[in-house]
Image (spheres, rainbow, N blue to C red):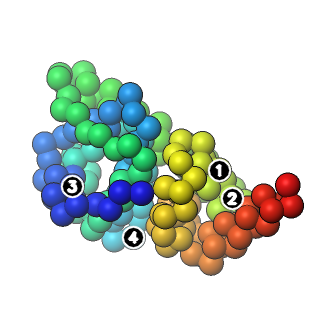
Amino acid sequence: MNEPSPSLIEQIRSGPCQIINSRKAGGIIILNRHSAEFAGPGAVVATPLDKHCENVIPLGDLALVSPKSIDDILTGYRIRLQWIKLVSKSTSLENTQLRAQKILEQFEQFFRKRDVQQVPDEVLAQLVGVLPQTIRSARKKKQKIKKKL
């Protein structure tokens, strides 16, 4: 996982808006005071929505590109909403252990396993509304299952 540079955080906070390159397997977790949001390929970032973010965590092969038109920006907002809906499917599960397992599975579909392993438990927990211990438990359970195979 890439460490966020101070310039990336500042770029996300202050704009101008950018699109996460949809030709690369990259994304960004945007951390706010009481929430976290994932934006994946094709999503617009560095918008007024991100002005007050506290931190960002780049994932995979993150590359930001400048939109060429207002249509690119509007498409980027639609795609960002789709990423929000994808993650929210995990949060709609009542069982917290299932929520934790689901977010790990979703991220491992898009990114290298080692990149996902480097995302702090607290951050993944914030994405799906569980305690960090629940994410830790789900990670351990996945490891045990893989060892049995």
Looking at the rendered structure, which numbered label has been put on residue 105?
Answer: 1
Looking at the rendered structure, which numbered label has been put on residue 34?
Answer: 4
In the figure, is residue 21 to the left or right of 59?
A: left
Which is in the foreground here, disc 2 or disc 4?
2
The residue located at (67%, 66%) in the rendering is 139
Do tag 3 and tag 2 residues touch (Cβ < 8 Å)?
no
Quarter containing the N terminus: bottom left
Which SS class for mark 1? helix
The residue located at (49%, 55%) in the rendering is 115
Which is in the foreground here, disc 4 or disc 3?
3
Measure how far apart labels 3 and 2 are at the Cα level.
Answer: 29 Å
At label 3, counting other C-alpha atoms closer than 10 Å, the crowd grade (few under 14, some 14-19, many 20 or more) is some
Q: In x, y percent, where is residue 97?
A: 72, 66
User: The residue under label 1 is which amino acid type?
Assistant: Glu
6 in relation to 47, above or below: below
Q: Earlier in the sequence, mark 2 or mark 4?
A: 4
Which SS class for mark 2? helix
Q: Residue furthest bottom?
A: 133
Q: Earlier in the sequence, mark 1 or mark 4?
A: 4
User: The residue under label 2 is which amino acid type?
Assistant: Gln
Do tag 1 and tag 2 residues touch (Cβ < 8 Å)?
yes
- The answer to whether one can see residue 97 in this image is no
Nearer to me, 53 or 57: 57
Which SS class for mark 4? loop
Q: In x, y percent, where is residue 6?
A: 18, 63
User: The residue under label 3 is which amino acid type?
Assistant: Leu
Measure how far apart labels 4 and 3 are at the Cα level.
Answer: 21 Å
Provide the residue designation for mark 3: 8
Provide the residue designation for mark 2: 101
User: The residue under label 4 is which amino acid type?
Assistant: His
Measure how far apart labels 2 and 4 are at the Cα level.
Answer: 22 Å
